[in-house]
Amino acid sequence: MKFLIILTLLLSSIYANNANKGQTYYLYLLKDKLGYNGAVFAKKHNTKEWNELFNNDAKTLKTMLIKENDELETLTNSKKFEKITPFIKAFVMHYAKDVKNSPSCN
């Protein structure tokens, strides 16, 4: 039982850390290009919708981002975007429309 509690705490700590990294990536790489803060971005969809956007190497997400600002095409097609995608996903899932958490994004 103690092992299960420790494992749960460890995993939730890792998940929260990934969400924080994702928030930072959003702030520095996407916020200026999209024109709104991370709280608005994360609340655009619920967790199910975000999961669908991140399926197939985030192909639908990439299309959505490019539609909002075509300057994001270079970023979304880069190796860097592939590396940060799990963190962005953790961020939006942690603060999605159907989750009661609210990020403190500027």
Image (cartoon, rainbow, N blue to C red):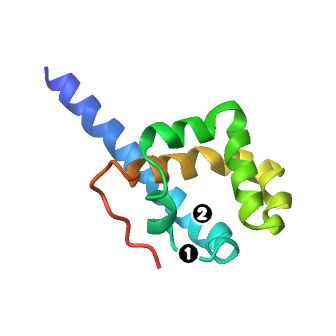
Residue 80 image position (x, y, % from top left) = 76, 53
Q: Which residue is mark 1?
A: 36
Residue located beneath label 2 in the image: 25
- Lower sequence index among marks 2 and 1: 2
The percent position of residue 51, horizontal first and vertical second, equals 53, 37
Residue closest to the eye, 96 or 26:
96
Q: For this rendering, which residue is in front, 8 or 66?
A: 66
Residue in the foreground of this view, choosing between 79 and 48: 48
Q: Determine which quarter of the picture holds residue 103.
A: bottom left
Quick check: 15 left or right of 65?
left
Q: Is residue 79 left or right of residue 13?
A: right
Q: Residues within 10 Å of mark 2 (few under 14, many from 20)?
A: some
User: From this viewpoint, is residue 18 visible?
Assistant: no
Q: Residue at x 70, y 73 (%)?
A: 33
Label 1 SS: loop
Name the residue furthest top: 1
Image-quadrant location for residue 34: bottom right
The residue sitting at 45% across, 53% down in the picture is 19
At horizontal 69% and vertical 47% (from top left) the residue drawn is 83
Residue type at the position of mark 1: Tyr
Q: Quadrant of the N terminus?
A: top left
For the residue marked with disc 2, what is the amino acid?
Answer: Tyr
